[in-house]
Amino acid sequence: MKRVSLYFSLLIGLFLCQCDGYQHPTIPEVNVNFTIYPNSVSYLDLNYIGGYMYFTGGVAGIVVYRLDNATFCAYDRACPYDWENNEAWISVEESGLTLIDEHCGSQFNIIDGGVIAGPARFPLKTYRTRYDGMILRVYN
């Protein structure tokens, strides 16, 4: 019975760690639906693995990160700890491995949006992404 419970917990954890949207406990829902062409020269920073770019939309803007050749993650730039503060925007750290809110000090994993450090208790708000090799759609 313990083994089944462990497998079930791991399965649930895998679903939660994907770059998909979900109902966030602190940040409100706003409509997000846009497309970009990551392979074009207009989006050079998304042409390589580990590249990222900032976009308008969401609650405080959106950061799109290229995880691998076929996977993109999109996070709202509103910090789950103090999302109503106009100075509390998430940005990518110099290392390119974490996201940080310089205002409150919260750090987040760039791969899944999970909390690494700081006062934030909830992960970043994520948006769904769909990439067909040419067009990337970011939506909720």
Image (cartoon, rainbow, N blue to C red):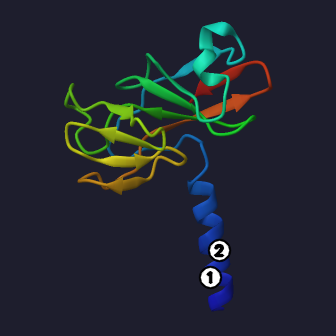
Which amino acid type is marked by label 2?
Phe
Asked if residue 107 lies left or right of residue 109, the reply is left
Extreme-top residue of the structure = 42
Asked if residue 87 lies left or right of residue 116, the reply is left
Residue 133 x %, y %: 80, 25
Q: CA distance from mark 1 to mark 2?
A: 5 Å
Extreme-front residue of the structure = 95
**Disc 1: CA contacts within 10 A as few (<14), some (14-19) or many (>=20):** few
**Disc 2: CA contacts within 10 A as few (<14), some (14-19) or many (>=20):** few
Q: Is 63 in front, or is 47? A: 47
Residue 106 x %, y %: 28, 47
Residue name at image x 20 percent, y 43 percent: 104
Residue name at image x 56 percent, y 55 percent: 16
Task: In the rendered view, tell whether residue 102 sits above or below residue 61.
Answer: below
Q: Which residue is mark 1?
A: 5
Which amino acid type is marked by label 1?
Ser
